[in-house]
Amino acid sequence: MLSPLAIHFFRFCSPVFFSNLGYVEFFGTPGKTIKSANEDTVGGVFFLARNMHPGSKMTLHLTRTTSSVTLLPRRVSDSIPFNSTQLPTILSRLSVEPNSAKAEAIKKTLSECEEPAFAGETKLCASSLESMVEFAMSSLKTHSIQAMSTKVSKEGTPKQEYTIVSLRKMPASELVACHGASYAYAVFHCHTTSASAYTASMVGMDGSKVEALAACQTDKAAGVEEAFKKFGVEPGTVPVCHFLPQVDLLWARN
């Protein structure tokens, strides 16, 4: 049976078919722009932890996520195959054209879900509400958990400069991160992480307010290896950070 938290989560969380969430340029020091190889999403922009502080400015286009698909209950998701060997069956069941962009996205997500976890990490591609909540509770070894995400105050905000007003480090030493994946229904790539997490309160030029989650880590993790190379630092030394898009979740002990 799901906990009250899980039931509440099911009511408010309805992620989109994940697409472009915004473009970010991060200004850690005056005149210096930090960019990444994948700058079309907030989560693809990396920066060094020392460049994230009150007064830092960034230019981004980030609007409130609009829902188009929902987390499926387990009894429904379990009835649909979820492995690359059954891709033709999956596409047929979901009425997705084999040569379409959505088919390619589904194929890519299945492949990523089947990749082995990093050393010391456990992972799961959650295709139902129950599987995501149960993975978080099992990984954190408690039934008392909370879900956190980036919050944007209003829709339709333009690309504009934001200023970090305050920064708060979360006390949790163990977290579960769940990243929205491109699929025909809501799928989250969840994994354990020892990253340090922060909440950055930001204000835009038009008065828009954002409570952005940031994850900073010194060890290798999916999508972070290239960032270490880019900044010329070795894993295990200097923390590299990125903001979490609004569709991503961080689970922590309550």
Image: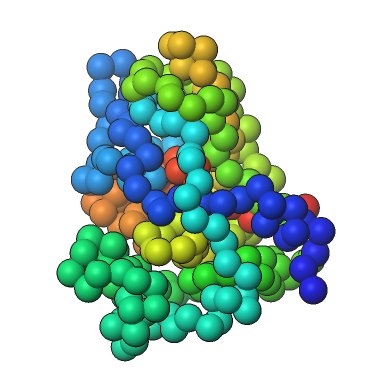
Residue at image position (55%, 21%) is: 209
Q: Is residue 34 above or below residue 249?
A: above
Residue at image position (48%, 81%) is: 80
Residue at image position (50%, 46%) is: 67
- Check the picture and name the quadrant holding the N terminus: bottom right
Q: Residue furthest front?
A: 95
Residues 246 and 29: in front is 246
Residue 196 in the figure: left or right of residue 225: right
Tell me the quarter of the picture where residue 44 sits.
Answer: top left
Residue 161 in the figure: left or right of residue 250: left
The percent coordinates of residue 144 (x first, y second) are 80, 60
The percent coordinates of residue 11 (x first, y second) are 69, 52
Q: Residue furthest left?
A: 99
Residue at image position (39%, 72%) is: 94
Q: Is residue 59 above or below residue 77?
A: above
Task: Count up the numbered dots.
Answer: 0
User: Is residue 244 visible to the viewer in this orientation of the structure?
Assistant: no
The percent coordinates of residue 12 (x first, y second) are 66, 48
Q: Is residue 24 above or below residue 194?
A: above
The percent coordinates of residue 36 (x first, y second) are 25, 41
